[in-house]
Image (tube, rainbow, N blue to C red):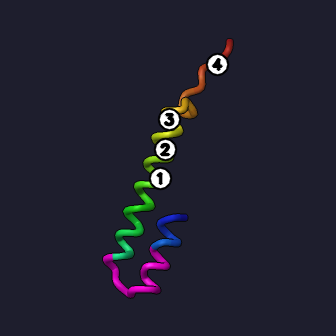
Amino acid sequence: MVAIGGGWLALRLTGSLNWLFVALALGLIVYGVALTAAITAGAWLVESEA
């Protein structure tokens, strides 16, 4: 949502593709940080209590 919303906003306000790619890059960074935080918190591999 960050990449889509930010990209659309950047393109509408500036008309420049450079800012569109900046918004897409920021969206990928936010996604990577969220994924890293989830993996670090243990959401990726949950140990069974068997």
Mark linked to residue 48: 4
Q: How many marks?
A: 4
Cα separation, mark 3 vs mark 2, equals 6 Å
The quarter of the picture where residue 50 lies is: top right
Q: Residues within 10 Å of mark 3 (few under 14, many from 20)?
A: few
Q: What's the residue type where badge 1 is placed?
A: Tyr
Residue at left offset 48%, top offset 72%: 6
Instruction: Measuring from the top left, give residue 30's x and y in whole percent.
Output: 46, 54
**Which residue range is magenta in the image?**
7-18
Checking the image for residue 31, the label placed there is 1
Residue 18's mark?
A: none
Instruction: Report the residue marked by disc 2.
Output: 35
Query: Which residue occupies the foreground of this view, 26 or 4?
Result: 26
Alpha-carbon span between mark 4 and mark 2: 22 Å
Residue type at numbered disc 4: Ser
Disc 4 and disc 3: Cα gap in Å? 17 Å
Instruction: Inspect the image, locate mark 2, and give the three-letter code of the amino acid beneath it.
Output: Leu
Measure the C-alpha gap from mark 1 to mark 2: 6 Å
User: Residue 27 in the image: x percent, y percent?
Assistant: 45, 61
Taking the spot 45% from the left edge, 47% from the top edge, the residue there is 33
x, y percentage for residue 2? 51, 64
User: What crowding class fits label 4: few (fewer than 14 Cα within 10 Å), some (14-19), or many (20 or more)?
Assistant: few
Which of disc 1 and disc 3 is earlier in sequence?
1
The residue under label 3 is which amino acid type? Ile
Q: Which residue is mark 3?
A: 39
Q: Please report contact status of discs 1 and 2: CB closer than 8 Å, yes or no.
A: yes
